[in-house]
Amino acid sequence: MRALLKASVALLALALATPSIAKDKVLGLAAIDLQNSFFVRMKEAGDVASKDYGVKATWQSAEGSLEKQVGIIENFVNQGVSAILIDPIDKNAVVPAIKKALAAGIPVITMGNKVEAGGNYSTLYPDYDNMSMVARAVGTSLGGEGEVALLVGSRGNFVSDTREKGFVETMKKEFPKIKIVGIEPTGWDAAKATNAAQTWLTTYPDLKAIACISDSLCLAADSVASSMNINLIYGGYDGDAEMKDLIDNGKMVMDVLTGAYRVGYWNIAVAARLANGEKMPNDLFMPTYFVTSDATAEKLKKAGLNFEHINTDKEAVEAKNYTEQLGPKVPTSAMTVGK
C-alpha cells in the first residue's frame, strides 16, 4: 500500500511539473472557411504538424461570417485552449476577442494578418513586395499596355488588402498605360470569381489579363475565359498545384508560392511552440518563391524584368517539404526569416 501511495504521489508530482502530461495541449483554430482548396490543404498539413508536435488542433469554420468567427474565438477562450489561431475576416473587428484571449493568458496567432491587439503574434508574408512583382510580370508581359482586372478576397482582410495595394500601386506607378477596369471582392469564393469574370469579359472585350490574390480565383476566371474561347494571361498567389498547366503553358506568367500545405504546417508549428512556452518575435515571416516557367522567365528577362524563380517541378518539391523545413527537430529560429 505504501509503495502504491508513493507511486501515486510521484505521478502526481510529474504531472504538475510537466504541463503536457497534466493537460494535453489543445490549439483552437478559427478559419475563414474550410471549403476553399487553400484552406482544405492548410488543415491537411496542419493536422500533420499536430501529430509531429504532439498537440490536438480543433479547426472550426466561420463560413465567411465575422459574427460567427468572433463567437468561435470566444468559445475557445471559455474552453481554456492552449493557443488560438485566427485567420481574421476583418483584422480590426476581431481585436476585442483577441484581447479577451490574451487577458486569459492564451497565446493568439493571427495568420497572414498584422493585427495590433497588444501581445498577439502575426504570421506574415512579404505580400506587398510579392504582389508588386506579380504586377510587373503581368505588365511586362502585356508590353505595358492594355486592360486588366483584379480578383481580391474581402475588404478589411490584411492579406487581401496588402496584396491588392501592392498590385494596384505598382501597376499605376510603373505601367501608366495599363488600365485596371475592375477590382472585385470575392470572399475567396470561386463562384463569385466566376461571376465577376463573366461580367468583365462581357463588358470589356479588350480585357487582356486577370490577376488574383489567391490561385483558386484565377482558376475560376480561366474556366470562364476558356469556355468563351478568350485567351487571357494571369498572375496569382499561393502556389496551388492546380496552376501547373497554366504556368507551364505560359498563361500564368507568375505565381507566388507560400504553399497551402506549408502555411498550414507552419502556423500549427508556431502555435505548438508558443503553447509550450517557446519565445518568438511577435511578427514572424515565411519565405516565399516566385514561380513561373523557365521559358516565361526568359521572356521577362529579355523584356527587362529580372527575378529569381523556381519552375513547377521545383515548386512541387518545396510545397510539401514542410516537415523538414519546420518540424519539431529544427530550432525555433527556423520559424521565421527576415522581412
Image (spheres, rainbow, N blue to C red):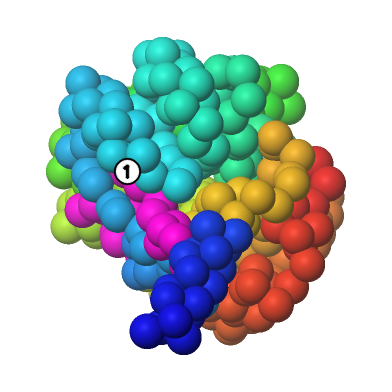
Query: Would you call the spot at circle 1 few (<14 residues within 10 Å), some (14-19), or many (20 or more)?
Result: many
Secondary structure, mark 1, is strand
Q: Which quadrant of the rendered structure holds the N terminus?
A: bottom left
The answer, for residue 244, to whether it is visible in the render is no
Q: Residue at 70% x, 44% y: name it.
A: 284
Decide whether residue 43 is among the magenta residues: no
Location of residue 86 in the rendering, given as x and y in whole percent from the top left corner: 41, 37
- Nearest the camera: 304 or 18? 18
Stretch in magenta: 20-41
The answer, for residue 13, to whether it is visible in the render is yes
**Residue under circle 1?**
31
Q: Which quadrant of the rendered structure holds the C terminus?
A: top right
> For this view, does 181 lie left or right of residue 328?
left
Residue type at mark 1 is Ala
- Nearest the camera: 100 or 32? 100
Tell me where residue 56 sits by quadrant: bottom left
Location of residue 13 in the rendering, given as x and y in whole percent from the top left corner: 54, 64
Location of residue 183 in the rendering, given as x and y in whole percent from the top left corner: 38, 24
| Up/down of 21 relative to 229, above or below | below
